[in-house]
Amino acid sequence: MMSRLSMRWRWPVVAVVCLAPLLAQGDDAPHRDFLELAAGWCSGAVRADRPVARGRLPLGGDRFAGFADFAQDNGDILRAYDPDPRSGARIYELFNRSERGLRAALSGRLDADCRAVEGREIHYLASGRAEAIEHLGANLVRTGRRELLNPPVPAGSDPGGIRVALVDSGVNYLIPEVARALARDEQGRSLGYDFREMDDRPFDVDPLKRGPFAPVRHGTSVASVLLAHAQGRLSLVPYSFPGNDFRRFRMLVDDLRRKQVRIVNMSIGNTDPRGQRNWQEIVQAMASVPEVLFVLAAGNEGRDLGDAAAATSRPANVLVVGAVDASGAVSRLSNHGAGVDVAALADPVAGRGFDWRPRDLRGTSFAAPQIVALAAGILQKEPGLDAMELKRRICSAATPVRGEREIACGYIEARL
């Protein structure tokens, strides 16, 4: 599956002897070569040339790790980074050079003693598309545990009700509760779409934020809160959207119109134009469908968005949602101010993870779907309301927040 590693460096004899116990259990030749290379780096036995690239890799939350990429003679790239300097662990990732360019192949985590404790291998279809991530155990031995990356959507029937779009990293539609909620056409095909891969499989996977070996699974948790708070029938139109390419947002908006979506949940990014390029293009696209209510998560930087929101001239059909804690005060994570319309309890709120196991969720990403559920419930009873009237109804149901931080209309109490 992977080309044999091209070894550029000379190895001292002592390094090979020390690696013998490490390699004894490895039966897969590419894995054995990778272990040899990674362990040599970890132990200092290999002296590398200057890196061809450096950067910062997001690890989740506000954590980052600096990485360095090193080229090999055959064009492959080895990436090295330190996820937690206190632990002494190192992570090494191999990217193979192919006809289509570089693609992620294998990763390994080595402990402070340079022993491989776990790893991941990406499997590809003949078409070159990533199919699954296989989890590897100690010495990178195969465990048989796989994470799918692009499975087909199961067949089903349309549940009816208000059509709600979820613009995120996709959803895990292999979960029966999610599959039953999907909006479908007359042939039972899901109406969702993947604007990352440009196909009809918006499976929950975002490889851009933490890298291809540990993709973010976010949209399923957002969907779990939305479905838990639903106050009537709704049908879900999930979109996987590349947060780094907002040129496709206009295409997405055109798709919303064709599929008669009334409400859109956007728990990606935030409303601050200083944090998003092409914000004006997004604003114009949303304004072009005034019949649709866009519900945006305010973001989790703890900033006052009053001035920023005023500068952007947000369309009237946009509702920005912050988060409050159990006391009704604005969460320390949540952005706030006059640029945030309403808030909901999301510090924490009960939800589910990608595997549908119960989880406590925190952040404005999980406040927004509660407001979307409320909006869908209102529209179920009064389908003639336009987006601006719907927004006013929601604001009129809000309670003033406690404390000094401001939310324009207030917060919506949970209605589970």
Image (tube, rainbow, N blue to C red):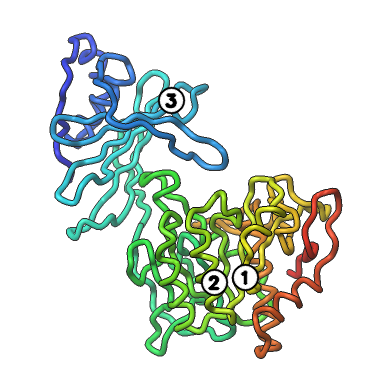
If you read the primary sequence from the N terminus, does the residue marked by circle 2 or circle 1 appear first? 2
- Quarter-of-image position of residue 19: top left
Tell me, yes or no, whether the two marked residues, 2 and 1, touch with CB atoms within 8 Å. yes
Q: Residues within 10 Å of mark 1 (few under 14, many from 20)?
A: some
State the residue in front, 24 or 71.
71
- Tag 2: amino acid: Met
Cα–Cα span, label 1 and label 3: 48 Å
Q: Residues within 10 Å of mark 3 (few under 14, many from 20)?
A: many
State the residue in front, 220 or 282.
282
Cα–Cα span, label 2 and label 1: 7 Å
- Tag 1: amino acid: Pro
Tell me what residue is drawn at x 73 percent, y 64 percent: 341
Q: Secondary structure at mark 3?
A: loop
- Quarter-of-image position of residue 258: bottom left
Tell me what residue is drawn at x 37 percent, y 35 percent: 118
Tell me, yes or no, whether the two marked residues, 3 and 2, touch with CB atoms within 8 Å. no
**Which label is found at residue 140?**
none
**Which label is found at residue 315?**
1
Q: Which residue is mark 3?
A: 89
Q: Which residue is mark 2?
A: 286
Quadrant in which the C terminus is drawn? bottom right
Q: Position of residue 200 (x, y in %)?
A: 35, 72
Q: Position of residue 49 (x, y in %)?
A: 24, 20
Tell me what residue is drawn at x 56 percent, y 72 percent: 264
Q: Position of residue 31 (x, y in %)?
A: 23, 35
> Is residue 283 in view?
yes
